[in-house]
Amino acid sequence: MAITALPPDTDADIARVTEALAMITPRWNVRILLALSGPPLRYSELAAKVSWLQNGQLHPKLKALCDAGLVQRTEHTSRHVTYGHTDRGAALLPVLPVIVTWAEEHLENTDRPLPAIEQIEDSLTLLTRRHAAAILWVLKSREEVSGRALARIIMPSSDWTNIYPPLRQLVADGLVDTEGIGQPYRLSAAGDGLGPVFGALSAWSAGHPLTHAAQHPVWGRPGAVPAPKPWVSNQALPAPTASSAVRAAGASRPTWQNRDLFSHTVTARPKAALTAGGPRR
C-alpha cells in the first residue's frame, strides 16, 4: 500500500533509498563496512580494526549487517569463522566517495580537516531525517511547493500541519529554502546538489550499476559520466578521532588499498561552495 500520494514507481524508489540509508546510518556501521574491505576477517581481526568499540558492541552490529545482506558470516569450522562483504555490501562501497564529494562542497567548514568517514556520518545524519527523502524528491521534481501541497503529497492521511516540523528541520539543515511563513519551499544549492548521492543510492538499492545514477528520472543528469574520486586507506589508528581516509584525484572509480580504514594524514578540505553550508550533526 502506498504511503504517499506520489506515483507508485516514485514511492517505491523513495522507500528503497530510505531503507538503504537506514541500513548504513546507525553508528559505526560504515566504519565496520570499511574495515571489512579486503579479504574476510576473523572476529578478532575485525575487532582490532575497530578497537574503539567496547566488548559486546561489535557482535550485534555484525549481526545487523548480516541480516541486512551487507556482510556474510562464513563458518569454515567450529573454530574458524570469518566475516566479509556480500556482493551487495561490496557494491555499496563506491557510493561512499559520492557522499564525501557532496559533503566537502556543501557542509559547513570546520576548524580542522575532517576524515572522509566523518564526512559520511555527518551527511547520513542529515539525509535520514524523518520524511527527508520524500520532501527532497518532491521539491526536486516540482521546484517550488507550498507546505500544504507538500503535506497532501507526502502525508495524505495526516493533519497537513504535520509537514512543518520536518520542513523546518530541512531548512535548518541547509537543504531547503523558503522566503518566510506562507511562502513556497524549494531546494537550496546543497539540496539540489544531492543528485549524485540519491542517484547512486537509488541505483544501488535497485540492484543496478552505479552508472545508472545519471539516468535517474528525478535526480539524474542525462549524458553525465560519473567520476567519483578514488580513496586510499592506509594503516588504521586505534581511535576514530585521530584517523582519516585520504582521497586522491584522477581515477575513474573508487579504489580501496591496503585493506585498512584510515590513514595517518588528512588532506585539506576545499573551500565550501556556499557561504554558509549546511550544518553537521
Image: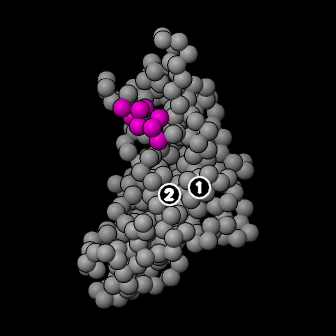
Whole-angstrom CA distance, mark 1 to mark 2, is 7 Å
* Nearer to the camera, 29 or 72: 72
Question: What amino acid type should be assigned to the residue bearing mark 2?
Answer: Arg
Magenta stretch, residue numbers: 60-68
* Nearer to the camera, 17 or 97: 17
Residue 117 appears left or right of 232: left
In the picture as drawn, the residue positioned furthest to the front comes out as 1
Question: Residue, x 42% and y 66% (percent of image)?
Answer: 1
Residue under numbered circle 1 = 206
Q: Secondary structure at mark 2?
A: helix
Q: Mark 1 or mark 2: which comes first in sequence?
A: 2
User: Which numbered circle lies on residue 92?
Assistant: none
**Placement of 70 over or under 205, stated as above or below:** above
> Residue 124's quadrant in the figure?
bottom left
Question: Residue, x 46% and y 21% (percent of image)?
Answer: 43
Percent x, y of residue 96: 55, 49
Question: What amino acid type should be assigned to the residue bearing mark 1?
Answer: Ala
Question: Residue, x 46% and y 61% (percent of image)?
Answer: 15
> Residue 214's quadrant in the figure?
bottom right
> Given contact means CB atoms under 8 Å apart, are the residues at marks 1 and 2 in contact?
yes
CA neighbours of label 1 inside 10 A, class few (<14), some (14 to 19), many (20+): some
Q: Secondary structure at mark 1?
A: loop
* Residue 181 colored in magenta in the image: no
Percent x, y of residue 166: 31, 69
**Residue 186 visible, this angle:** yes
* Residue 66 colored in magenta in the image: yes
Residue under numbered circle 2 = 16
CA neighbours of label 2 inside 10 A, class few (<14), some (14 to 19), many (20+): some
